[in-house]
Image: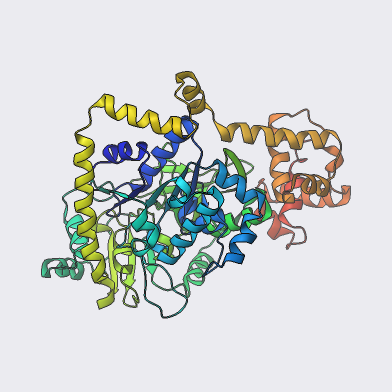
Amino acid sequence: MTQAEALNILKSGANVYLTGNAGSGKTYVLNQYIGYLKAHGVEVAVTASTGIAATHMNGITIHSWSGLGIRDSLSDWDLEVLQEKQNLFKRFEKTKVLIIDEVSMLHARQLDMIDRIARAFKRSDKPFGGMQVVLSGDFFQLPPITRDASEVCFVDQSNAWKCMDIKICYLEEQHRQEKGGIFTKILNEIRSANVSEETMQHFRSRYRKAPEGSVMPTKLYTHNADVDALNNRELEKLPGDMEVYEMTSRGKGNLVENLKKSCLAPETLRLKEGAAVMFVKNNFEKGYANGTLGTVIGFDDSDASLPIVKLKDGREITVSSESWAVEEDGKVKAEIDQIPLRLAWAITVHKSQGMSLDAAEIDLSKSFVAGQGYVALSRLRSLEGLCLMGLNKTALEVDARILDLDQELKNRSEEIMEVFENLDEKGLKLMHDTFVVQSGGTLDVEEIKRNKNFDKKVVIRGSTYEETRKLVEEKKSLIEMAKERDMTEGTIITHLEKLKEMHPELDLSYLALDKKILKEISDAFKKSKDTKLSPVYSLLKGKYDFDELRIARMFLKE
């Protein structure tokens, strides 16, 4: 099935399981459908089984969205407590479409509990209370984590799955690896549990062999141990000054904290010239994607001292801050900003899900669960990007039950595709329009156009700076502004820096530091002959924190 065919089935309002090989474009299709729903005014909840997957689509975890949390069971009393929460009531009342990404990591029992919660809030005996449910994932990837030794149960074994008349959309195009190439053949053999001697020979040919190209490969490990330590150790080896970038945030405290934990960008990013880095967000217009590797070759001359990253193909990108957000009911509930990079000498297989890597040094000698090898290897775009450090038997194993299920899913996908192929364009449009209307959406062309063109983030960013500006005009202190806006002082300082740039006439003098402190910091900036923070921080031996240095820097040119 192609992406376009899957999108047509999604638009019909059917409950769907969207699946396919790694790199087949599942997230792309979901984002296309989310855009379509928003343009037509249909309320959609975007969730995922893990926080990392949720950040790929500006969503939240299904556990948080549904109110399920960390529960392993759901009693009648638990359900009564949840039903008393007004925010959950309003959430379920509005939502017409529920999307859950990476369902391979969701236990069957959890899907049943979410179904039960939805029926209760929607006051309906229909599966999930009558919402359209779109599940997405790949059962060949990492399975649900069990807290005990109980058997792994994928969502297809749930009662909810059996009751929801789910349509299977199995994507068969390949958008990460070269279609029909050697590497695609290797990955397909792993999926079919039929690894040939030819494939093993290919693995041997990549044993401890450096990937082609100039980019330093990311090390993928099956265990968390020592990943951060290795990255920090490699960074410390590099000569030169350290540049430090602090994450800024706004929104509800608990949502911000969950977003920080889920985002692959670190709260404090430390970089030096020569650092191996990985982009952790898609921005195709600027020329990078989640998983693109590069090397820091320097920093620009702006006040922010933005890192300049050289990619494998020789392109150089000056990397500016990006945002990750939690959106609900068309509003941003929490948002964080950070340079979209992380040190990339090492990363875990688990955190690599959803990424496309140019080069990786992969150690699968300690693989402990079926699917780990497939997840790690399928991150790569080509065999030439692989340096294989080790391989055990488990690495190439797949769950035997998934093999049979996969064939069943392919068959069911072909069946539903035949049904939709028999619909003419007029019949298909009628089906799509009917679902939109039944979901409380709009078919008005002008309204759809307005919804498409409405850049929510621009409005939010503009208004949030203006809100801070009003407080400045009221001569509020930094602490007062942070408290009133429910933000960190660091975020408020970011706003002040932006406001000073946008409105040079704005009077910030009342926020200036003590004259003696300001002179000391000012002298350090002059001595460093730069506006970067790290050299000044070092010159002053950490006497003042980075926020104080940022405040002082705003007054250097006055």
Say above or below: 453 vs 164. Answer: above
Frontmost residue, 551 versus 265:
265
Q: Is residue 181 left or right of residue 502?
A: left
Where is residue 27 drawn, in percent x and y? 38, 47
- Coloration mode: rainbow
Where is residue 280 drawn, in percent x and y? 46, 52
Q: Which picture quadrant has residue 76? A: bottom right
- Tell how many labels: 0
Where is residue 236 drawn, in percent x and y? 54, 67
Q: Which picture quadrant has residue 394? A: bottom left
Frontmost residue, 274 versus 338:
338
Where is residue 336 drawn, in percent x and y? 60, 49
Specify the quadrant that holds the N terminus: top left
Residue drawn at x 49%, y 58% as measured from the top left: 116
Specify the quadrant that holds the C terminus: top right
Residue drawn at x 51%, y 70% as measured from the top left: 233
Say above or below: 239 vs 413. Answer: below
Residue 274 visible at all: no
Say above or below: 397 vs 264. Answer: below
Residue farthest along the bottom direction in this orientation: 149
Residue 399 visible at all: yes
Frontmost residue, 544 versus 361:
361
Q: Is residue 338 left or right of residue 538?
A: left
